[in-house]
Amino acid sequence: MSSALLTAMRNPVIRASMLAIFLFGFAGAATSPYQSVVGIIELGLSDAFYSALIFAAAFLNVVVSITVGILADRVGNYRTLMLAVILFGIVGYGMVYAWPAKASFMLARLLLLPIYGALNSLLFPLHAPNP
């Protein structure tokens, strides 16, 4: 292993951040390709409606990510906000699993999962020291 990787593995905060980034990416890679299958084929959404839904969700994700980032900088506590957005992901994915219907899918995909997507912007400053 390179010396930079060894140094990172020795630091528990950086090690936890690396694991969180990996797991967040893994969750997205494991579910993203199948969301259109569930929405269009299983639940019967039209292609155009699903496209509009995903566009609105992407827009909301950008807005929420910026807002959560600004809020985290002002509050100075990234971990509490990280837990909050993680709960949105758990509820969003869990809701679609527990109640596979158009309404639960649309609510999860349009509101809950874009908020969970804000986790990406909170993971990277996790190892930064507090001023």
Image: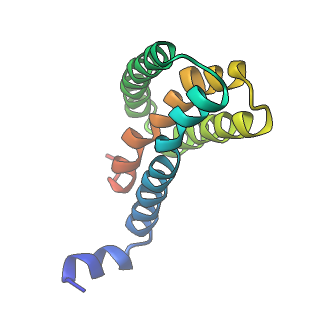
Q: How is the image coloured?
A: rainbow
Residue 97 position within the rendered picture, expressed as x and y whole percent measured from the top left: 73, 40
- The residue nearer to you, when weighing 73 against 64, is 64
Q: Give how far across and how far down residue 7 sits, in percent.
A: 28, 78
**Residue 14 figure quarter:** bottom left
Furthest residue toward right: 98
| Figure quadrant of residue 42 | top right
User: In percent of the image, x 36 and y 57: which residue is there?
Assistant: 127
Residue placed most toward the observer, 82 or 35? 35
Q: How many marks?
A: 0
Q: Picture coordinates of residue 75 (x, y %)? A: 46, 31
State the residue in front, 102 or 117.
Answer: 102
Q: Residue 78's x, y, as percent?
A: 47, 42
User: Please, is residue 8 above or below residue 3 in the view?
Assistant: above
- Residue at 59% in and 19% down: 45
User: If the image is split into quadrants, where does the N terminus sit?
Assistant: bottom left
Q: Residue furthest bottom?
A: 1
Q: State the image quarter where residue 58 is shown.
A: top left
- Which residue is at 37% across, 33% downward? 73
